[in-house]
Image: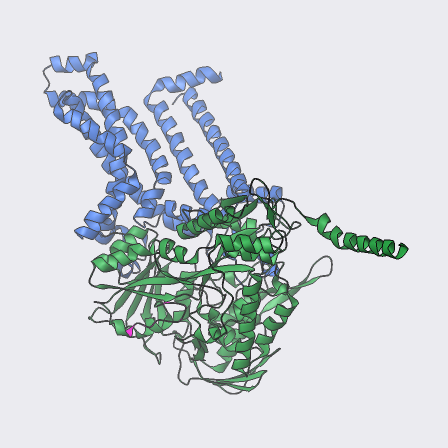
Amino acid sequence: MNRGVITYIAGRFLQSVMVLWIIVTLLFLLFRLAPSNPLASYIDTTFTKEQEAALLARFGLDKPLGEQYIIYLLNLARFELGDTFSYSGKSVLDILSADLPNTIYLTLSSLLVAYGVGVLGGILMAALRGSLFERVGTTFTLMTRAAPTFWVGMLLLTFFAFQWKLLPSAGIAPAMVRFRWETEWDKLLSPVFWRHMILPTFTLAVYLHGLPLLLMRSNMLEVLDQDYVTMSRLAGYSEWRVMIQTAARNAMLPVLTALTLGIGYSIGGNVVIENVFSWPGLGRTLVRAVQQADYPLAQGAFFLIALIIVFMNFIADILYSLLDPRVGASAQAQVS
Amino acid sequence: MSRKLVSLVVLLLMLLVFALPAASQTSGEMVPTIIVHSVTQAERPIEYETTRLVVENMRELGLEVEHRAIPWAQMIDEIWFSRTVDSAVADRPFQMTHWRMVGRPERSDPDEFTYNLFHSSVRDGGYNFIGYNNPEYDALAEAQRVEVADKEARLDIICEAQTIIRNDMVNAYFIHPLTPQVVNTSAFNPDSITTQAGIGVHNFWTWIGIEPTTDDKTLITSTTSFLNNFNPLEIAGDAPSRVTEMTWDRLMRINPIGVAEPWAAESVEWEDPLNVVVTLRAGMKWHDGEDVQSDDAAYSFEAALAGTTQTDEDGNESFRAEAPDYYPFARNVDSIEIIDDLSLRFTLKTPSAAFETSSLAKLNLLPKHIWEPIINDLLEQDDADVNSIQEEIPIGSGPFKYVAYDVNEFVLLEAFDDHWARPKIDTWLMNVLPNQEATLGQIQSGEMNFLWEWPGDPGVLQQIVDDNEHLDIFSAISIGFNYFAFNVRYAPFDDVTFRQAVAHTIPQEFIIDNIFNGLAAPADSFVSAALEYWRQCDDLPTYDFSIDGARELLASAGYSWDDDGRLLYP
């Protein structure tokens, strides 16, 4: 690795930290400026002024805004996300760390399906350019890309879960099974868990597969015009070998970048699917936290999502500089 | 001549004196724009639609009316924390809002609503957010608390209180919701399902009495809200409350017709209006196998009373309860004396007719061996109270015990074999299911067999019951009610005639038939028709839907209209 690349990565890292700082500041301000009161979930006929003051004091909401901000930043730096307003005896980290794995499993498996189908489909469409298959396929992909995920999810639920009773409709497992899991491994090794994952994964994949498919297709078409592909053909390799080994390998690069970014964005974007399928993940907790004006929990969830997105962006940048030496070199030219 | 002149001058002076205050107020001025609050359509469509309709009708009176629909969390700021000009968090104090009170078993005694909604002492911070201040009413609200022995005398007071509120029209009640619930009657015997007055079929008596018709003795239900916590000293929303009342016993319980009856107590005997002796049933066990004894019962109240008195910089003393949610229900207890292993005597500070309903039938019995160390530990900390406590597997003495739960997913209970009233089902499961369509799908497919909570359109439930032979709908009039609340501190709602006129613009029947699809009962008071005993009053004043009637009423009080039809103050 040359000096340019290192400087480039260090620069990117600093940039990422700045972006995060801006995000957390915005989060902090947004929640406090938003016109909703965190005591909303506490109001009861027996509620008194003293109780109100005690509650505000308990969560530190009686302190000046500036002081709250400093406390918040210091805690974040130590990754202390605080206590939630609405769950007793649990910290934000407890809640989110229970949710995050579920979201990650769902995201990764649907990305896997989506990119698997997308890449293969893209190659096939490029290979069969102009055919009926390509035309129908492209239209179909655009349609699935445009269909709202909650609608697709509900359709799948109606048919597969309720009409034909083939697949479970909600959650990650029936409670009877669920409560016997003690570790994350018990969950991952349970076939019940994977059965529950089929519908949400498929719904998400229907939406996600469009991007890699169309990207792969257009990259392939571009690559297929290149001299080295023509050379391979002239060398007498079979058409499939030309397609897969020569063209596809080169056309894949932008798709891989899209995948890295996709992981980040999908983790934050599962909100709708998680609600439709009652999937206990980050997105569902986020919605709930916002509804309840549970500042610490909502901030924590947004922070975690932002962190993942910024981190995946950072990874994508590094990948780029490693895969394409020109990126690092131009960066060096800029800084020196 | 001079006598005539003098009398004329006197007359003129008198006229002037009487006319002046009226003139300096608002005579002939236009009634300003009125803002009516409600939650958003997305949040609760029924409330939004009702408000929209009433706002339309109010405009017919010559009023400029704005419908302000905002999320519930924001309503708290604009209503609850915006009562007076000085204290308003929003730009100005609220004027009129849609509001609702929900039914809970302990609300089947009229005390809570009679006192907390209207007594002038809870005007600034408590539930009398409308600012009602009527010494005559205050006296009644206090008197009904003291009338322990004579239930009929108390009924008279409650009736008088209802009449005053109805006449003064500080809250325009219009419906008590019917709570539609759906049960899979091929899985359960429908005759074993109990309807509790004002609550519905999802109540303690159903949970212990419901008989499975097959070998699968599991009841599966769901909630759209989350199961935040299971803590016997915290009131944490509707769904968790349903669960805590099953797993922690109480000395008394509200029976299906709304009256407190001895439960974990074998007897409750009043020696005089201040002293009551409670004797526990023999042989009760905690879920961990220990015996339930009178010192546990005493500690359950002591824990609710525990707290520290703090003095701030200005020397003001304030009391910080460790269990702020339950402290109000125990506060009237002066002392508790343990007589023997099973009996104890409560001495009250003041006589209280509602003590059985709102204290003995409200506080959960706690195992002293578990909670004493927790409370003692909390008393030494300044910044924590019981709301931060969650037991790993909570221990109570109720007919159901905890097997497992996950805050975002489910709670699983099992019948407690050592309980004297062991339920007929073996397992009780509540799943968290935020998606209403999934709820409907599950009850139809049989994945779920008891649907107790339905925030959506009631007509949809009726439809699926018509389509599915194995499903039956149950509905009961709620103790809760929907109404429009007026901020009576400020014009124009400080004028009783104006409020009465607005009440005439609420098309009660139309709302019930069209917005609630018939699943609501007409309301005219804060005491629900479900509480039959407390409604044995002479007829309350009625306010029929009539725009013309409302206009006549306004005209007779001196209101008039300008050329554009805008309403003017008298």
Determine the colour of chain A: blue
Quadrant containing the N terminus of chain A in the rendered view:
top left
Left/right placement of residue A333 relative to residue B445 reads: right
Based on the displayed image, in which of its 4 quarters is residue A217 positioned?
Answer: top left
Q: Nearer the viewer, residue B352 or A181?
A: B352
In x, y percent, where is residue A155?
A: 23, 44
Left/right placement of residue B569 relative to residue B399 reads: right
Q: Is residue B283 above or below residue A320?
A: below
Q: Which chain is green?
A: B
In x, y percent, where is residue A120?
A: 18, 30
Magenta portion: prevailing SS class: loop
Magenta span covers which residues?
B192-200
Left/right placement of residue B311 relative to residue B524 reads: right
Asked if residue B199 lies in the magenta stretch, the reply is yes
- Say if residue B322 shows up in the picture: no
Q: Is residue B317 above or below residue A83?
A: below
In x, y percent, where is residue A79?
A: 48, 44
Q: Is residue A324 above or below residue B552?
A: above
- Say if residue B543 shows up in the picture: yes
Asked if residue B78 lies in the magenta stretch, the reply is no
Write the residue at 50% across / 53% down.
B548
Left/right placement of residue B361 relative to residue A219 reads: right
Q: Is residue B121 above or below residue A14?
A: below
Write the residue at 62% across / 44% down.
B30
Q: Nearer the viewer, residue B391 or B135?
A: B135
